[in-house]
Image (spheres, rainbow, N blue to C red):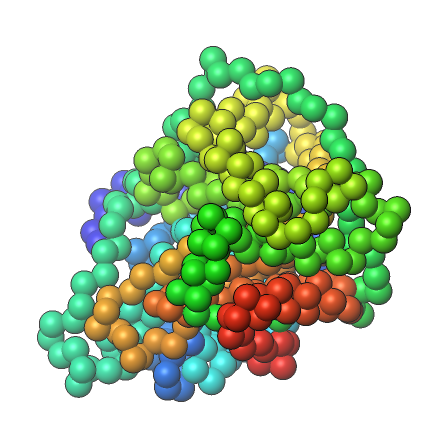
Amino acid sequence: MLFTNKEKDAAWSRLDNAAKIFPSTVEKSDTRVFRFSCELEFPIDRDILQRAAVEAAESYPGFNVVMKKGLFWYYLERCDEKVKVTQEDLPVCAALYEEEHIGLLYRVSYLRNRINLEMFHVLTDGTGALELLKTIVYRYLIYACPEKFGDEPPFLDSGASFAQKSADSFSKYYDSSLKGKKRTKNIKAFKLRGDRLDNNGMSVIEGFASVKSVIEAAHKYNSTLTVFLTALYIKALSSEMPLSGRKKPVAINIPVNLRPYFPSETAKNFFGMISVSYRFDKQPDDLESIAAYVKESFEKQLTRENLALRMNSLASLEHNPIARIAPLPLKNEVLKIARHISLKSETSVISNVGRIKMPEEFDGLIKRFSVIVSTQNIQLNICSYNDTLQMGFTSSFAASDVQREFFHLLTSHEIAVTVRSNDSY
């Protein structure tokens, strides 16, 4: 990919609309970092990975930035620093942004046969980060297996130009004429309770299953894979509800990639949120009823019109003339309060990145992909590669009863599941 001097020399850029909340809400218990990993069928060579990572980053110069404070907003400034590949020696999703240490907002590491890419959410969402990891893995395999590919490596579509990758699609699709419904009062959701892990620790428990087997089970409930797993998750969470807690809904937030609804090839954040709230004191507790309700909720919310209204609502702060001239410290406090209030109406998050595609020539070289997200609560993250479905739980709680119940529900549908935990990290 070639870039013009003008594109290369862009010295700084604003944070996209979704990114603005992340710097203000970073905590030791939630670093706002997420990780994509790719496991190969053979051990990683650090020197080859270093070359692949540096060259891949050249196709995504918008990621080679540091974040600085301005008078009114944070901003990203281009830097010449190259990513340095390290053997994994930090906790999963360790902090990438610290005010006193300015540096790159992503890291590349490896352990045995696994390549990790961790991103501070300010830079991008899962779609953008995944494209960078795929490019790193592509270059790594080409360099590591010259006898297999020679002078004719398979094609990986890196797609967009620098201008397209660096576009702020929230601004592009903002429509001041759109007016949403009046905001409803936030309802307090059911929240998990229990002992937290020491030192702001985060547990990682992953399950792996056949995509085909999970889809077959989902079809029995007339649902998609995501709807089915969301219903299972709601059911699993309900197993931890005391009788008094059933008056509060199990409220699941689901990030939505906006690119299929609003054409964009941006590598910046471009996602929205939908939510599903289920009341076990008023609705049936069988899986069939839960799945039907989740499916209906998805169908109502996953429309271009509804997502546009939500996107405009998210952009209201940026386009508010009073808020725009408020100093950054004041904005930070307001955003922290807003985040705290929003968490009260959320039980958990489930995020399905979807199917990850690589050239078929890499079959037999790549084992699987994984996705993990930092959280101060509990979250389920999903992706798939070929017929391997990864379901990764991250949690700040010491107990793992919800995860155990979720995988038990899966196996009760005759789905074979392999589970691993922090030991592999």
- In the displayed structure, does residue 417 sit left or right of residue 21? left
> Residue 136's spot in the image, x, y percent?
34, 67
Answer yes or no: is residue 74 visible: no
In which quadrant will I find the C terminus? bottom right
Vertical relation: 405 (above or below) 423: above
Q: Nearer the viewer, residue 173 or 286?
A: 286
Quadrant (top left/top right/bottom left/bottom right) for the N terminus: bottom left
Q: Residue at x 35, y 54 (%)?
A: 60
Q: How many marks?
A: 0
**Based on the displayed image, in which of its 4 quarters is residue 49 positioned?**
bottom left
Q: Nearer the viewer, residue 131 or 12?
A: 131
Q: Residue at x 62, y 46 (%)?
A: 290
User: Residue 70: x, y in percent?
Assistant: 59, 37
- Residue 385 falls in image quadrant: bottom left
Q: Nearer the viewer, residue 34 or 343?
A: 343
Which residue, as the protein is rendered here, is positioned at the far top? 177
Q: Establish if 58 lies above or below 420.
A: above
x, y percent for residue 106: 49, 60
